[in-house]
Image (cartoon, rainbow, N blue to C red):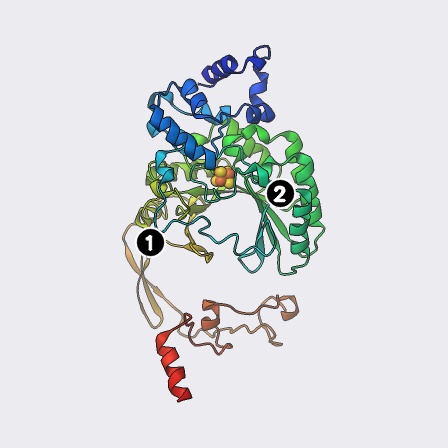
Amino acid sequence: MQLVIEEKLKELEKNYKNKNLSYWKDWKWQLKNSIKTISAFERLLNIKFTHEEREELEKITSTFPLSITPYYLSLIDPDDYKHDPIFLQAFPSINESMVGNHDMEDPLYEDKDSPVPGITHRYPDRVLFHISNVCAMYCRHCTRKRKVGDVSSIPNKEELKKGIDYIRNTPQIRDVLLSGGDALLLSDENLDWILTEIQKISHVEVIRIGSRVPVVLPYRITGDLVNMLKKHHPIWINTHFNHPRELTEDSKEALRKLADAGIPLGNQSVLLAGINDCPEIIKKLCQQLVKNRVRPYYLYQCDLSEGLAHFRTPVSKGIEIMERLIGHTSGFAVPRYVIDAPGGGGKIPVMPNYFISFAPNKVILRNYEGIITSYKEPDSYKNHDCIKGCEDCKLMMKTYEADKYKAIGIEKLLLDSVDTISLIPQNNNRLQRREDNDED
Ligand code: SF4
């Protein structure tokens, strides 16, 4: 398929007629020759749309661009493209124009939780730093369609400096996730500058990079890039494989280079209807990832972003998949299945229920085979109620090493040292009545 595409590209791109095939692995050539129009897709894959279909598809790509690298295109099976998981992730569907009542432009409230442009600060000790808004391939299921692909709003150096200033001025941030768009689409020099600036901040302990280039543009993982990244350890990279067919020899080579550079690799998949909503596909994907030194990290329930309804599965499909992973394959090959809470509540793990019942000092559980078992709890356990400040701490960490921390949420209910006995939603009518009665 690769040669067919190359031949067709050569026909299409007269400029390349005199060049030899070595350019196929040149990531800049791949980007420059990305397929960006419906008509080019039709020519390359011998697809014919009706005039109306083409018009509709072009309307869709005018709001969220179409762009696919020749490499990723070459993975499509042209004889069955309609069911092809690569095609379905890369090529727009007419369903994208359908926006349901519950769909949102920014379902995760990333922009609302943004203290300065480019930063999303949601969790206590970490931030998401959007350093790019371009990608090598525009995934049709992208949750950030509202901004990704808009070349008019690529963050400039001044904007990036403001993000870095926010991190510098916020001492509780110990973990920075560089994402976008695709963080690895920046030049080596620009990325080196950002990593250097962030690493000068003493409270930042780790930097993570989110990138789909190992999947859609593996040639971006060059020796130069890897050598530059190595200077900035501890660096972690999370990538985004959704289907075992994406693990080609070229992408495995990219993963090998990153892993050999000592970069821990994780993978975040999205559960997508008609693409990977099958326990066997996800299991195969996870096992292949582990074989290539990538830890399956998250399996995301598809977000409520506008135009993604056709990609969404019921949550029960995710639970079914987890049921068939947990216990059935190595624990480190099992991702965490999460729903990213609409409204910005963060990732909520969901899984099959393994607890059956409780009694004082006994827990009843079931395992992946359906065996029901009991676990005897200790009769004489003495609880350590850590209140961070106890002079007589018998545990390993001395209190002067412990972070100063204020309990939030459910954690407050668990601590005996905090007086909170319930968490109450705002505008609770019953409590309002109580307050009114007290005033009378
Ligand atoms: S690589 Fe990530 S940010 Fe870019 S289009 Fe795909 S999902 Fe969206």
User: In this view of the protein, can residue 321 be seen by the observer?
Assistant: yes
Q: Nearer the viewer, residue 157 or 399?
A: 157
How many marks the image carries: the answer is 2
Residue located farthest toward the top when viewing the structure as drawn: 18
Which is nearer the N-term, disc 1 or disc 2? 2
Name the secondary structure under disc 1: loop
What residue is shown with label 2?
A: 155
Q: Which label sits in the foreground, 1 or 2?
A: 2
The residue carrying pointer 2 sits among few (fewer than 14), some (14 to 19) or many (20 or more) residues within 10 Å by Cα, namely some
Q: Residue 182: x and y, percent?
A: 55, 39
Q: Amino acid under label 1? A: Pro
Q: Which residue is mark 1?
A: 352
Give the quadrant of residue 219. Answer: top right
To which quarter of the image does residue 18 belong?
A: top right
Residue at the spot 39% in from the left edge and 28% down from the top edge: 55
**Cα separation between marks 1 and 2:** 41 Å
Residue 434: percent from left, percent from top:
37, 83
Percent from the top left, x then y, of residue 353?
32, 57
Residue in the picture at 50% in, 76% down: 418
